Image (cartoon, grey):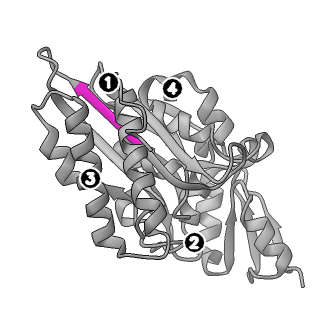
C-alpha cells in the first residue's frame, strides 16, 4: 500500500524552517528522493507531509568561506562532479560522486540525502571524513552544527529526528599542494554499491617526508573509519612500499577490532589491504610489485 501524504514545496529556506517549526514531527524531507521514493511506494513511510527542498537555492550553494568549502545539502552528485571549485578544493568528493549509480541517479541524488540515509556503503562519506566535514542542521527552528563523525551512528542510523533538515556541509580546505585519491571495490564495474571504498589525502614536505596524511575507509565498520593512529604514525616518514604495507596491515587490524570477525572477513581483509596499497601507491606515486595489491 502506498503512503498517503500532503506534498509541500517551500519557496525559500526561511519558509521551510517555519513550516518545520510547526509540523516537523509529521514531516519527511525530500531532497533527491532516490531511496525515499522507493520506501514510500512500498508504504514504509508514514507521515502527514513530505517537504521537497531539492530546489531551495540556499541548499544549492557551493562557495568558499574562510578556511572552509561550503556545499549545500541539495547539491546533486552531478553538480559535485561538474563543480570546478569542488574539484580544486576537494577532489575526493567529486571523484566519489562520479561513482554513484547511473547518470539518472547522479542527476537527482543529493549530498545531504546520501549522508542522511547513512548507508555504510555511501560513496560520499570517506571523502567528507578526510575533510573533517561538519553538517549544519535545522532542528525546531534552531541552526546547529555537528561533525559528520557524530552523525553516522551505524548502518542507516543517525541521531537525526523527524523534521531535521540538513542545510549544508562545511569542508576543511586542505593546504596546497596536496595529493588526493578515491578508490572503491564493487561487485561489478557499473552501478554497483561499494563493498569497500577509500579516500586519502596527503602533503609532502620539501624533503619528501609526509607532513599531512588523512585516510578514511567505508563499508568495513559500523561507523565511518578514520585511521587516526596510522595517520599520526606516518608523519615525518618518507613513503615507500614498506610503509604502504605497514599502513595497510595496521589499518585493517584497527577496523577488524571495531567490527569483529564476520563471514565476510575472509574476503574483506585482504581486499581492504590490497585497496589501501593500491590507493596509496597512486597517492604517493610509488610503483608496486605485481600481486602486491591483490
Is mark 2 in CB contact (under 8 Å) with mark 3?
A: no
- The answer to whether residue 27 is seen in the rendering is yes
Q: Is 3 on the left or on the right of 74, as rendered?
A: right
Task: Report the magenta residues as a range.
Answer: 199-203
Q: Is residue 239 magenta?
A: no
* Labelled pair 1, 4 in contact (Cβ < 8 Å): no
SS type, badge 1? loop
Considering only vertical position in the picture, is 165 above or below 24?
above
In primary-sequence order, the first of circles 1 and 3 is: 3
- In the rendered image, residue 153, in percent from the top left (x then y), is placed at 42, 72
Crowding near the residue tagged with mark 1, few <14, some 14–19, many ≥20 C-alpha atoms within 10 Å: some
Which quarter of the picture shows residue 45?
A: bottom right
- Seen in the picture, residue 265 relative to 272 is either above or below; the reply is below
The reply to whether the C-beta atoms of the residues labelled 4 and 2 are less than 8 Å apart is no
- Looking at the rendered structure, the secondary structure element under dot 3 is helix
The C terminus lies in which quarter of the figure? top left
The residue that label 1 is drawn on is: 286
Q: Main secondary structure of the magenta part?
A: strand
Residue sitting nearer the eye, 199 or 242: 242
Give the spatial CA distance, label 1 vs label 4: 23 Å
Residue 108 image position (x, y, % from top left): 74, 47
Q: Which residue is mark 4?
A: 87
Residue sitting at x 77%, y 58%: 9
Secondary structure at badge 2 equals: helix
Q: CA distance from mark 1 to mark 3?
A: 18 Å
- Residue farthest front in this picture: 290
Residue for point 43% across, 68% down: 265
Amino acid at each position: 500500500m502506498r503512503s498517503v501524504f500532503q506534498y509541500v514545496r517551500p519557496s525559500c529556506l526561511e519558509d521551510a524552517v517555519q513550516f518545520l517549526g510547526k509540523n516537523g514531527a509529521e514531516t519527511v524531507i525530500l531532497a533527491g528522493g532516490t531511496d525515499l521514493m522507493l520506501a514510500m511506494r512500498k508504504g514504509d513511510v508514514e507521515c502527514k507531509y513530505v517537504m521537497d527542498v531539492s530546489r531551495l537555492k540556499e541548499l544549492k550553494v557551493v562557495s568558499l568561506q574562510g578556511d572552509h568549502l561550503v556545499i549545500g545539502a541539495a547539491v546533486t552528485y552531478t553538480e559535485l562532479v561538474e563543480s570546478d571549485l569542488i574539484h580544486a578544493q576537494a577532489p575526493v568528493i567529486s571523484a566519489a560522486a562520479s561513482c554513484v549509480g547511473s547518470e539518472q541517479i547522479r542527476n537527482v541524488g543529493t549530498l545531504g540525502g546520501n549522508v542522511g540515509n547513512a548507508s555504510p556503503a555511501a560513496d560520499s562519506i570517506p571523502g567528507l571524513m578526510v575533510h573533517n566535514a561538519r553538517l549544519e542542521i535545522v532542528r525546531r527552528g534552531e541552526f546547529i552544527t555537528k561533525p559528520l563523525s557524530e552523525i553516522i551512528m551505524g548502518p542507516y542510523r543517525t541521531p537525526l529526528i523527524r523534521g531535521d533538515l540538513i542545510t549544508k556541509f562545511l569542508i576543511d580546505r586542505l593546504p596546497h599542494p596536496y595529493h588526493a585519491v578515491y578508490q572503491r571495490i564493487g561487485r561489478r564495474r557499473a552501478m554497483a554499491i561499494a563493498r569497500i571504498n577509500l579516500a586519502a589525502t596527503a602533503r609532502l614536505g620539501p624533503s619528501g617526508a609526509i607532513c599531512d596524511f588523512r585516510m578514511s575507509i567505508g563499508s568495513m565498520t559500523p561507523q565511518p573509519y578514520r585511521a587516526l593512529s596510522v595517520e599520526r604514525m606516518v608523519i615525518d616518514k618518507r613513503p615507500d612500499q614498506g610503509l604502504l604495507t605497514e599502513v595497510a596491515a595496521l589499518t585493517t587490524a584497527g577496523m577488524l577490532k571495531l567490527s569483529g570477525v564476520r563471514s565476510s572477513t575472509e574476503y574483506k581483509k585482504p581486499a581492504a589491504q590490497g585497496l589501501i596499497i593500491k590507493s596509496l601507491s597512486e597517492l604517493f606515486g610509488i610503483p608496486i610489485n605485481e600481486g602486491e595489491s591483490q
